[in-house]
Image (tube, rainbow, N blue to C red):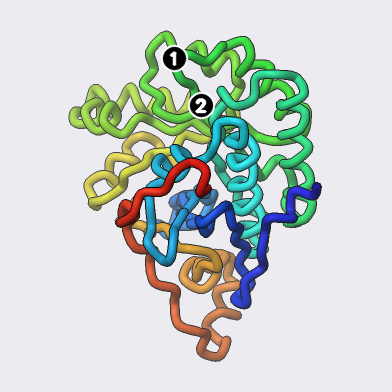
Amino acid sequence: MSIFSNLVRQPDGAFSARFGPYLLQSALQPIFAERADGRLQIAALKGLVRASINDVLCSPADFFHYVPEEERAAVDGLCRSLHILNAGALGRRDVSLIVNFNGGLYVTPEAIRHEVERLRLAAHQAGMPPACIACEIREHLEDDPDVLAHFAERLHEGGFSIAIDDYTGEDRDLGRLQRLQPQFVTFDTAWLQEFSENSAGLALLRVLVGQFSHKNIRAIVTGIEDADMIARCRDMGGPLMQGYLLARPELAPTSFNLTFPLLDDDALEAVADAPAASPVAAPEPRALRPVRQFGRRGV
C-alpha cells in the first residue's frame, strides 16, 4: 500500500491524514538565522504533529498512547510524511526541515530500510532534496546506542541529515555526536539558560558554537521568548534561533512566505510591489486534552 494512501489534500492545499477518529495535521515553526544586517531569515522549520477529534486538540503524547504498539512505527512515519509534504509546498529549497524520530521504533534492518525508503518517497513527492530533511533522533534509556548509530548511518547513506536534541555537553552527549554525526544540535533549554547567565559561560558557548560550525554542525537555541536571549545568542556567535518571540507554530498552509520572504533585494522588491495577499494565518491554538477518553480499539 502506498504511504500516501492515508493522506488527504485539503482545499487550502495542505496535507492532512486520518487515523481512526483522529485528524492529523502539520504545524511548522520557523528556526531563524540572523544576518549581518540584523534581519532574520528562515533557515529551518520544525515539524510538529497536531492531532484532534472533532476540532478538539490533544497532545501528541496522548495521541500516541492510543495508537496500538504494532502500528506506532507506521503512524510515526505518516506524521513525518505530512511534515515533508507540507514543508515542500512552501517551495523554500534553501530551508531545512527537522522531523522527530522515536529511534526505538526502528530496531531491525527491515524496519530501518522501510523507513528510509518512506522518507525518500515523501521527499521526492515534495520536491525536497533529502539533505534538507534532518531526522532528529531522540534517544531513550532503553534504546541500544549501536542500533541508533546503524539507523543514523543508513539515513546518511540515503542522503538525509541528522539532528539531536537536549545537548548539554556531558559525556553522553559527546558520545551521541560521535555515533550519530549530526548536522543540527539543539541545546537543552534549561542548561543553556543557566550556562549563559555570565560572561564565562557565554565565552565557552561561543567556543562550542564555533567548534560545531567548523564541523558543519548548526547549533540551535530554542525557547527564545525575550530580547535578552537574542542578545545572548549574538554573544554565542550566532546559533540558529527558535521561539515564540520570533514566530509561533502555524498549521499548514502557513503564512511564512508572506511574513518571512526570501531576503535578497530582488525578492523584497517583488513582495513590496505585489498586490495585497490573503490574510496572515493565525497562530495555532494550544493543545487541550480531549473531553472524552477513547479506547485503543477506537483508534
121 lies above or below 237: below
Mark positioned earlier in the residue sequence (2 or 1) = 1
**Up-down: is 211 above or below 36?**
above
Residue 36 lies, in percent from the top left, at 45, 52
| Amino acid beneath label 1 | Leu
At horizontal 44% and vertical 73% (from top left) the residue drawn is 281
Q: Residues within 10 Å of mark 1 (few under 14, many from 20)?
A: few
Where residue 216 appears, as percent x and y from the top left, is 60, 30
Q: Which mark is residue 141?
A: 1
How far separated are the C-alphas under marks 2 and 1? Answer: 25 Å
Q: Which residue is mark 2?
A: 212
Drawn side of residue 147 relative to residue 291, left or right: right
Residue 168 percent coordinates (x, y)? 36, 21
- x, y percentage for residue 26? 53, 56
- Looking at the rendered structure, the secondary structure element under dot 1 is loop
Residue at left offset 44%, top offset 58%: 52
